[in-house]
Amino acid sequence: MDMLYRKYIKRILDIILSLSAMIILSPVYLVLFVLIRVKLGSPVFFFQDRPGLKGRVFHMYKFRSMTDERDEKGELLPDEKRLTPFGKKLRSTSLDELPELFCILKGDMSIVGPRPLLVQYLPLYNERQSHRHDVRPGLTGWAQVNGRNSITWEEKFEYDVEYTEKYSFLMDLKIIFMTVGNVLKRDGISPEGAATMDYFKGSR
């Protein structure tokens, strides 16, 4: 049953769930589009290349949550200075992640899987950590419900690899329910004392 789920059923459910969610949440998309345009300006969406299954790069979409404020040299200010109270609310409620449903529908992502990180991290993973790309990246994942940004990179990657080794329908269902609980409680949104997670620089 697990093999059938991994090979066929998971992808079918991804298509059904992502398409249904996009239709149901279309009014939310519209409201967020207007609010972001008014409060943060244009563009409303944030686009970035991220590595997916087998490390293949795809375009990931999110709602913008930071301003484009720059210093006198024209360089972007630190994340904590560009993240407005409105942007913090978008992140704490995970509403900024909603455009990723389109990535799921396209087949670049899954509902559940390791979070897609930066392309620049690819050469920094050790052999075990690189196995996080054995499955499609997810909107939520095992690491997200076990600490999200409040745990170390090494702990995150261990949860990611554990997921690739053990995932099943019941495990995915458990992660989805835990995700709902974490979003409501707003757990692990950012590391203590920082607006965003420090960049991964490789494991010792």
Image (spheres, rainbow, N blue to C red):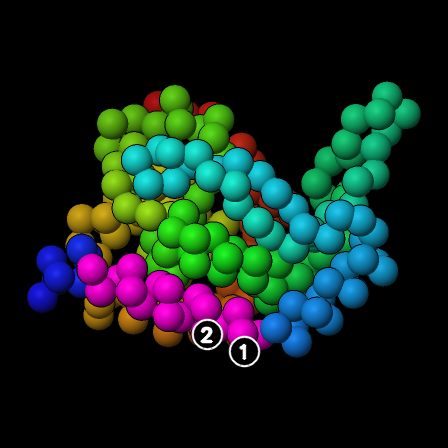
Is 22 covered by the magenta stretch?
A: yes
Q: Is residue 3 above or below residue 199?
A: below
User: Which secondary structure, mark 2?
Assistant: helix
| Main secondary structure found in the magenta portion | helix
- 134 magenta-colored: no
Name the residue that disc number 1 marks.
Answer: 24
**Residue 129 appears at what percent x and percent y?**
29, 34
- Residue 52 is drawn in which quadrant? top left
Residue 42, percent from left and from top: 80, 49
Front residue of this view, candidates 6 and 74: 6
Mark 2: few, some, or many residues within 10 Å (few <14, many ≥20)? few
Rounded to the nearest whole Å, what is the CA distance between mark 2 and mark 1? 6 Å
**Which quadrant is home to the N terminus?**
bottom left
Q: Is residue 168 above or below residue 128?
A: below
Amino acid of disc 1: Ile
Q: Which amino acid type is marked by label 2?
A: Ser
Q: Please report the residue visible at 81 percent of the width from the left and 58 percent of the height from the top.
A: 37
Span highlighted in magenta in the image: 8-25
Relative placement, left or right, of 54 versus 71 is left
* Residue projecting furthest to the right: 72
Q: Residue at x 70, y 40 (%)?
A: 79
Q: Could one spot residue 145 in this view of the protein?
A: yes
Direction from residue 173 to residue 165 in the image, left or right: left
Question: In the rendering, at what x and y percent does residue 148 appear?
Answer: 45, 54
What's the mark number on residue 20?
2
Tags 2 and 1 in contact by the CB under 8 Å rule? yes
Numbered disc 1: secondary structure: helix
On the image, which quarter does residue 179 sit in? bottom left
Q: Residue at x 22, y 70 (%)?
A: 170
The image shows residue 15 at horizontal and vertical percentages of 37, 64
- The part of the image, by quadrant, that contains residue 130 is top left
